[in-house]
Image: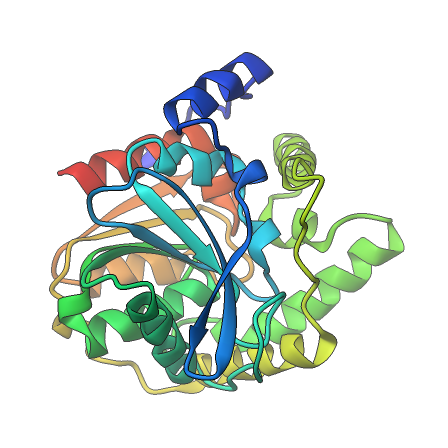
Amino acid sequence: MTDRRSTQRVPERHQQAQRARLGGTLYQDAPTKSVHVGATRFAYRELGLDTGVPVIFLNHLGANLDNWDPRVVDGIAAKHRVVTFDNRGVGASEGKTPDSVEAMARDAVAFIRALGFDQVDILGFSLGGFVAQVIAREEPELVRKLILAGTGPAGGEGIVNVTSVTYRDTFKAVATFKDPKENLFFTRTAHGKSEARAFVKRLKERSVDRDKAISLRAFRTQLEAIHAWGAQEPSDLSRIQHPVLVANGEDDRMVPTSNSFDLQRRLPNAKLRIYVDAGHGGIFQYHERFVGEALEFLAS
């Protein structure tokens, strides 16, 4: 399914209404908490409802707590408990960054269990989508539903090129005083550029208690893990029997959109949403549409 509706802005009055529905808290105000997983402290934030199956957000390459689009977090938190967290060695979380997706998945499972959850829904974006697939395959009873956005399967088309694409677009962005995500996540059309600027502006709404940026060493380690994932033999996705929503932009240059179609074909219970004139960050560009579809999927 392709979405041809343009993204709408959320004015301040809508944010106020959203805050009232969330018990007075938006993601930009959610306190940063911590939990120990063994001897390692993991940083996280949570908001939304106190009941029901929580939604765990798994983040992208180089991302910390402040890199989630607040419109997506707040939108899903209107109906669910949402938990975001820093991977091991990222942001305010302690420890050494794992050099494989499988190790990241084990950390995520340990974190989820440290919070006392017996079953969760997972939203995995990009690298987080790789991790989500491993969790669903290795710990099927822990997962109820999956949302896989801007991601692909092990051995997927073009995933081994993420490092070169990331460095090239980052250098271009730095040279033109832009956030690299404007190049990496969005199309270079007039509409894509406008939405990129709006997205970066939203990421700056939180003004206090901001997270630490990822270290260069941790960033490179994540790239190594992504390259290894892309170079692997394809895994048996038929083992993932959970309901899955796959979402992406039609022109994803980081994890080519063909991987989203591949996931939809190979996962037994998957549905697909593709957004026009959108790239890797299609769920952020079309945040209102995506949140509506995600809520419908989680409630079905």
User: Viewer-proximal residue, 64 or 269?
Assistant: 64
Give residue 139's quadrant in the image.
Answer: bottom left
Instruction: State whether residue 266 is above or below residue 217.
Output: above
Relative placement, left or right, of 82 versus 15 is left
Viewer can see residue 10: yes
Name the colouring of the figure.
rainbow
Q: Identify the residue at the far top of this view.
A: 13
Residue 284 percent coordinates (x, y): 51, 40
Residue 285 percent coordinates (x, y): 52, 36
Give the residue displayed 70% in from the left and 43% down from the top: 208
Q: How many marks?
A: 0
User: Viewer-proximal residue, 76 or 289?
Assistant: 76
The quadrant of the image that shows the C terminus is: top left
Residue 288 percent coordinates (x, y): 42, 28
Instruction: State whether residue 72 is above or below residue 36.
Output: above
Viewer can see residue 153: no
Give the residue displayed 51% in from the left and 73% down from the top: 41
The quadrant of the image that shows the N terminus is: top left
User: Viewer-proximal residue, 244 or 213?
Assistant: 213
Instruction: State whether residue 86 is above or below residue 245.
Output: below
Residue 172 percent coordinates (x, y): 80, 58
Instruction: State whether residue 153 is above or below residue 203.
Output: below
Give the residue displayed 42% in from the left and 71% down from the top: 157
